[in-house]
Amino acid sequence: MKEAYLAKDTLLPLVGLLMARYRVAAPVAVGDYHQFQILTQPEQLDLTYRNTRLSPKDLFHPQSEKLFRFSTAADDPDANILKEVERDQGPRLVFGIRPCDARALRLVDVNFDTADCQDPWWVERRRNTLLVGLGCTAPCATCFCSAVGSGPFDPGGLDLVLTELADGYAVAAASERGEALLADLDLLSALDQDRAAAAAEVQKTAAGTVARPFDPTPLGDKAMTELFQSPFWEEVAFSCINCGTCTFLCPTCWCFDIQDEVQKDAGVRLRNWDSCMFPLFTLHGSGHNPRQQKPQRVRQRFMHKFKYYIDKYGDGPACVGCGRCVQFCPVNIDIRQVVALMTARCVCPA
Ligand code: SF4
Ligand code: SF4
């Protein structure tokens, strides 16, 4: 792995250099929280954050996106013909993304970029975007990335990984694209042995502070029907108000709805985030709703992340342990406790 060193007083000049080549998205302070925004000046960057309230998935799968335009005018020869909305798909770079959020993008790839079906907008954004990660030196009490096969400095999914030191950052390439970028940034210097050792120590300490509240491994072997029919879903769902906060904040939730909006004789086809926690989510055209009751919807969220995804892709749970749903659920439903419940109530086949 190629490594380098970035002095703290060179951080903003480096970001300025990157902004000359890419549209750079990075964490920006907004009131009492941080969110990823496309920078207009390097000084907007604020790396003094632990985690952003919203994940950066919006940069790849916007909360609301115009896909097509169409006309409904009777005298328009192109009436009702969908025309793709132009969008800027030029080179981008996300600076300061947490390893869990970068890993989440890889988990979501299985939905938007498969051998059978590629979502062109997702695929193009993924290909055109470099990810410069900032490892977590002080994980939150609600973080559990280590329990789901990752860690606070997991390089998987990243191009570069930054480790914060007292006077700067150790920078490590985590992909071929990252190596090429590293070789092309002359504001960096060589990482000496002392700083390399300090970075390794920081990473080790951080890894030791992340809780492992459960082990999801046995869930892959559990009988689907046993989990599906377990009575505890009623208990779990009791206090849920189906607000959808957990799914909207989650970096691995990808569900969306397509809607047409028409004003006078001009229409747009929109793609909007949707949530399995909403009663209308699975309402069929016939009027039948297979998830009419709240426990069915709550079960879907947890089963999708910790059973269906594991069974379908054999790739661990569809959760990166960012802890956002734990932090912001208004009624304190805690996915760590639910998974512990799922694991405890299951009986492994002999
Ligand atoms: S955030 Fe909490 S209350 Fe809201 S839908 Fe999710 S589990 Fe239910
Ligand atoms: S389920 Fe919760 S902890 Fe897991 S990735 Fe989604 S928001 Fe983060």
Image (tube, grey):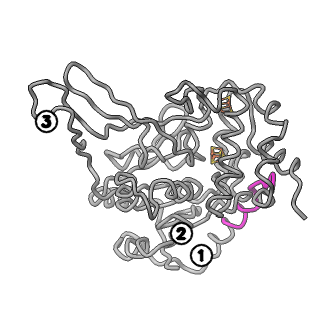
Cβ–Cβ below 8 Å for labels 3 and 1? Answer: no
Q: What residue type is disc 1 on?
A: Ala
Q: Which residue is mark 1?
A: 196
Q: Disc 2 marks which amino acid?
A: Ala
SS label for mark 3: loop
Name the residue nearer the viewer: 187 or 84: 84
The kind of residue on which mark 3 rests is Asp
> How far, Cα to Cα, is label 3 from label 1?
62 Å
Where does the magenta region start and end?
Answer: 203-214
Residue occupying the point 43% across, 76% down: 176
Tell me what residue is drawn at x 73 percent, y 46 percent.
141
Left or right for 32, reference 149: left
> Does 83 appear above or below 23?
above
Residue position for label 2 = 170
Reading the chain from its start, which is encountered first: label 2 or label 3?
Answer: 3
Q: Where, by quadrant of the figure, is residue 333 drawn?
A: top right
Q: Nearer the viewer, mark 2 or mark 3?
A: 3
C-beta proximity under 8 Å, tags 1 and 2? yes
Disc 2 crowd, CA 10 A, few/some/many (<14, 14-19, 20+)? many
| CA distance separating discs 1 and 2 | 7 Å
The percent coordinates of residue 347 (x first, y second) are 89, 54
Q: Quadrant of residue 195?
A: bottom right
| Residue that protrudes farthest toward the front in the picture | 286
Q: Nearer the viewer, mark 3 or mark 1?
A: 3
**Residue 125 has which mark?**
none
Image label count: 3
Label 3 vs 1, first from the N-terminus: 3
Q: Which residue is mark 3?
A: 78
**Image-based side of 302 in relation to 278, left or right:** right
Most foreground residue, 266 or 180:
266
User: Quarter of the image containing the C terminus?
Assistant: bottom right
Residue 12 is situated, as x and y percent measured from the top left of the image, at 39, 55
